[in-house]
Amino acid sequence: MLPINQVIITGKLASEPKQIDSNGTQLYLFTMASVGPTGRFVFPPILAAKLPDFVAYKPDAKMDGQPTLTVIGWVRTVNADVDLVDEVLRLARRAKVPGKIMQRLQAVLGKLDPPRTVPRVVVDIFAEQILPGGEWI
């Protein structure tokens, strides 16, 4: 039986892998395009200690031209404090708020003193194994 936070996800490489520092450990971060339970695309962030050679993003290729990957890993959650201004603006962009309202939001939020933070749970998938191929739509 798999642990409750174990995942197996198949999808297309959606971003160029970047090397990041995670509490003193060098990890690779990339996103995958996968089809969620509602039939819509989801783009989970994937962290990996090592990347196989076949995990190579092709910047000029469309999604169908990207490699298909199957990731076996576990869901990782981290409690973080994020800047209130950054979080509100991120959510406004996601909601496609018009440019003039965004500018007004930035002006109003820029007057906050001292800077404020809000708690947020960051969720990603830590890959234990990355395999080539898999079932793609």
Image: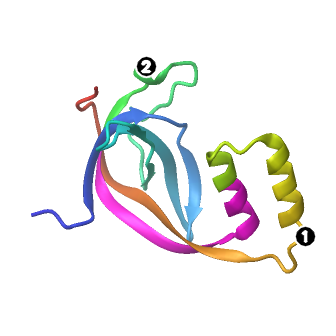
Q: Is residue 70 visible?
A: no
Q: Which residue is mark 1?
A: 111
**Residue at (33, 42) in percent of width and height:** 36
**Vertical position of residue 49 compared to residue 95: above or below:** below
- Judging depth in this view, the residue of 107 and 53 nearest the camera is 107
Choose top left, top right, bottom left or bottom right for residue 13. top left
Q: Is residue 29 left or right of residue 37?
A: right
- The percent coordinates of residue 131 (x first, y second) are 28, 39
Task: Kindly identify the amino acid type of the residue bearing the numbered disc 1.
Answer: Lys
- The percent coordinates of residue 91 (x first, y second) are 64, 55
- The percent coordinates of residue 65 (x first, y second) are 43, 19
Q: Which quadrant of the figure contains the N terminus?
A: bottom left
Task: Kindly identify the amino acid type of the residue bearing the numbered disc 2.
Answer: Gly
Q: Which residue is mark 2?
A: 65
- Judging depth in this view, the residue of 11 and 52 nearest the camera is 11
Choose top left, top right, bottom left or bottom right for residue 81. bottom right
Q: Secondary structure at mark 2?
A: helix
**Residue at (50, 20) in percent of width and height:** 62
Q: Secondary structure at mark 1?
A: loop
**Vertical position of residue 14 compared to residue 71: above or below:** above
Specify start and end residues of the magenta stretch as a single range.
70-90
